[in-house]
Amino acid sequence: MTLVDSPATVIGGPALSQKRRLVTAIPGPRSQELMARKAEAVAAGVGTTIPVSVVAAGGGVLVDADGNSLIDLGSGIAVTGVGNANPRVVEAVTAQLNAFTHTCFTVAPYDSYVAVAERLNQLTPGDHVKRSALFNSGAEAVENAVKIARHHTKRQAVVAFDHAYHGRTNLTMGLTAKNIPYKSGFGPFASEVYRAPLSYPYRDGGLSGADAAARAILQIEKQVGAENLAAVIIEPIQGEGGFIVPAEGFLPALVKWANENDVVFIADEVQTGFGRTGAWFASEHEGIVPDLVVTAKGIAGGLPLSAVTGRAEIMDSAMAGGLGGTYGGNPLACAAALAAIESYEADGLIERAREIGAVLIGRLNALRTGDARIGDVRGRGAMVAIELVHPETGEPDARLTADVAAYAHANGVLVLTCGTYGNVIRFLPPLTISDELLTEALGVVADALRAE
């Protein structure tokens, strides 16, 4: 049994004991029962990262039905930045639940939808006049951003980038680069989607951000043509693609070119938004002002909500009824979003993301110094990754990555893998995690590397 104590009280979370505790193997017998039921009831295409049955969560831990307490370095894929059971979110959702659960905003509107739109208009980069529209998921918001850009420009082509991930719907699969498991066998995909090379400093051979942008722009101009292009869409820091941070100057050069050619620049901030990178939005790190910003994940403390926010003249181009959906901007999710935004501000969680980043970068770079298999340490704030490679060749090492993740899971630390080559371990802890838990979790990752 492993039992490590940490403070029981956490910022923005319940008074759940903050400790890594293993009382059974992972998965334990009750979790195994759930996984057996899953196999009988749930489509095989719905996979899981770790086979546990969660019964409680908060701060920096997940507690399963067998009494195991695991350190959470995944945050439900960057969703629970304010914690899994943030008191403000719980109180706000409970109050809304007692009032009403649904009217459909496009039928009978309510205040909280408008209030969320107002806050998004205030918080997203740029001081221009903005409008927002609310949806349910990141993929749905991405699709609507493309719809809006096409309607505004009267053009059809859209450019995404190598290693991109934008969702699992038909259009967003077309925008997504990685074939397995996201695209294989699911085509044909939406037309008029093109791909350009990304700035990938670790694998670019020292190419500067400006030169990488010139390379991408040349390809766009020659293969698509600015006159045909409605939008360029990019993650300011790629998520599923491997937490790739473009070289300095890459994003500003793309924005400048887009502005000069009346191409809508869409920043997909689904994973990078809401304090995750140590700023409200990752676009801020290079001072870029997107035309449209897509948000989801961390916006509502775990409830399904997404948004497109952007320049009023672009957002208002769609006719009344052209945007919306039955559940988009559900009142429960809107109440959660307003409470989550309050928590980011009142609890200092954006500064906390920077503190978490300092711990992650420091500890992981220390590991890298003594282990040539760690080819790169990269990221911003509480969005950091290591890329694992063969030490002699630098080739991606997906097997080592899977083994390290499996060791961490077996020893009570939830980590996620990613990357086009399957060789990146990403660290996305809740912004409510304690330094003690974070340091301990990184120790388990170090043990995993030593064990291989």
Image: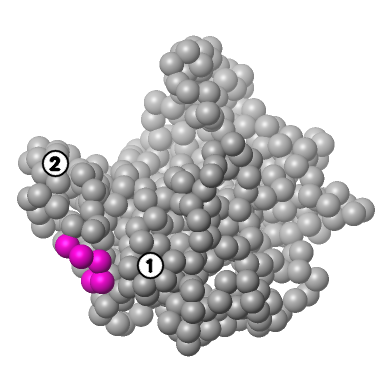
Residue at point 33% right, 53% down?
Answer: 306
Looking at the image, which is closer to me, 363 or 281? Answer: 281
Quarter containing the C terminus: top right
Q: Callout 1: few (<14), some (14-19), or many (20+) C-alpha neighbours within 10 Å?
A: many
Dots 1 and 2: beta carbons under 8 Å? no
Looking at the image, which is closer to me, 162 or 115? Answer: 162
The picture places residue 280, in percent across and down from the top left corner, at: 40, 67
What secondary structure is found at the residue carrying circle 1? helix
Q: In whole angstroms, how far apart are the C-alphas of marks 1 and 2?
A: 31 Å
The picture places residue 162, in percent across and down from the top left corner, at: 64, 60
The picture places residue 135, in percent across and down from the top left corner, at: 29, 52
Mark 2, residue position: 102
Quarter containing the N terminus: top right
Amino acid of disc 1: Arg
The picture places residue 190, in percent across and down from the top left corner, at: 48, 52
Q: Which residues are magenta?
A: 316-320
Mark 1, residue position: 150
Residue that sits furthest to the right in the current view: 392
State whether the magenta stretch is mostly helix, strand or loop. Answer: loop
Image height check: is 423 above or below 216? above
Residue 152 forms part of the magenta stretch: no
Residue at point 80% right, 35% down?
Answer: 451
